[in-house]
Image: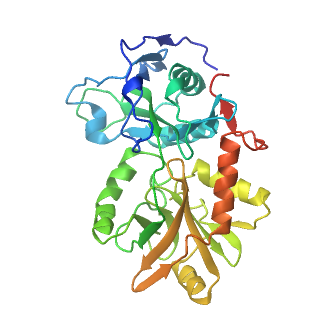
Amino acid sequence: MHQGTIKITKAATSKLSTTDFNNLPFGRLFTDHMLLAEYKDGAWCDPEIVPYAPLSFDPSLATLHYGQSIFEGIKAFRMKDGSAAIFRPYENLKRFNKSAHRMAMPDVPEFHFIEGMKQLLKLEDKWIPTAEDHAMYIRPFMFATDEVIGVAPSSKYYFMIILSPVGPYFSKPLNIYVEEQYVRAAPGGVGYAKTAGNYAASLYPAKLAKEKGFDQILWMDAFEHKYVQECGAMNVFFVLDGKVITPSLEAGTILDGITRKSIVDLARSLGKVVEEREISIDELVAGYKNGTLTEAFGAGTAVTVSKISGLQYKDTHISLDASKMPIADEIKQSMAALRDGSAPDSFGWMVKANA
């Protein structure tokens, strides 16, 4: 592991005293400091922690023109004993570098990603919220910084981490539109990578869905628009005939969600039957009509566990009672207890922020 140093330059003033922790809209407030490391001449420079501030760059910056940009979403939680812990950051590091490989970008060292994150959190400890369903959202990201117009992988990159104290991403159960025209990803593409372009391409279809009164899109497969993929901001789960079912990762078209894989393991530990497989929309419609489809929920770092109360597919509206989703409730409560230390961390998922 890289054993460099992390120079810290503290901000002259803090925004902490003027921050209303009872009003934390998601992703709009950022802490006093950020981490920055530069990749150049084939190697990473030591990371630095500096005051949070705008960046200055040339108009020819490669990432603005060719989209070499990846990111992760992680959360740190205030534990019952007053300490802070990060939820499964090593899994995010693995996925980050998997995305980097697909986007022809250099791997980020563990020291920069994990130790940088820990030291930034230690400096910003007082920013970590304590209220229920609140957390410190951690955003590592990397982007190309060559100053040249030309379609080729950049030779220089910035890796950064910024922090945002957040409340709940969604405040109510979701009404979902099943998308049949637009496509998020196809086999051989970049669907499994957490790259900025995936999200840019989703914005227009999501805008159309919101204009129709829906909260999110449920993406379908690229060829037949028959098999369920994921929602715009989350992986998706269904309870069919008492079994917890989620789309498999085999096609490489959906994100390998950290919360998704955690829910699979957690649900099995709670005695649930979990299946990772293809799910057709016809199976969901049939399950709704015969009463075997009883629950639907999304899972992701930002949303944690968010219930789905409605799915619109063609002329069929699948309506589910969000107040009667015992499996979703049990999973969410079990996850929350593990994350704040109320329950034993039998999986070893929580990483102390100051260790």
Q: Quadrant of the N terminus?
A: top right
Give the answer, above or below, for where 118 lies relative to 133: above
In the rendered view, does 355 fall on the left or right side of 34? right
Q: Is residue 223 visible?
A: yes
- In this rendered view, identify the residue nearer to me: 77 or 111: 77
Give the answer, above or below, for where 184 lies relative to 350: below
Q: Outermost residue, left direction?
A: 59
Residue 212 placement: quadrant: bottom left
Q: Outermost residue, bottom direction?
A: 290
> At 29% across and 62% down in the image, what residue appears?
207
Give the answer, above or below, for where 221 lies relative to 39: below
Q: Quadrant of the C terminus?
A: top right
In the rendered view, does 246 fall on the left or right side of 213? right
> At 52% across and 28% down in the image, what residue appears?
108
> At 52% across and 73% down in the image, what residue appears?
227
> At 42% across and 25% down in the image, what residue appears?
16
Give the answer, above or below, for where 163 lies relative to 6: below
In the rendered view, does 250 fall on the left or right side of 152? right
In the rendered view, does 25 fall on the left or right side of 148? right
Q: x%, y% of residue 218?
A: 45, 67
The color scheme shown is rainbow
Q: x%, y% of residue 228?
A: 52, 70
Q: Is residue 224 visible?
A: no
Q: x%, y% of residue 329?
A: 64, 61
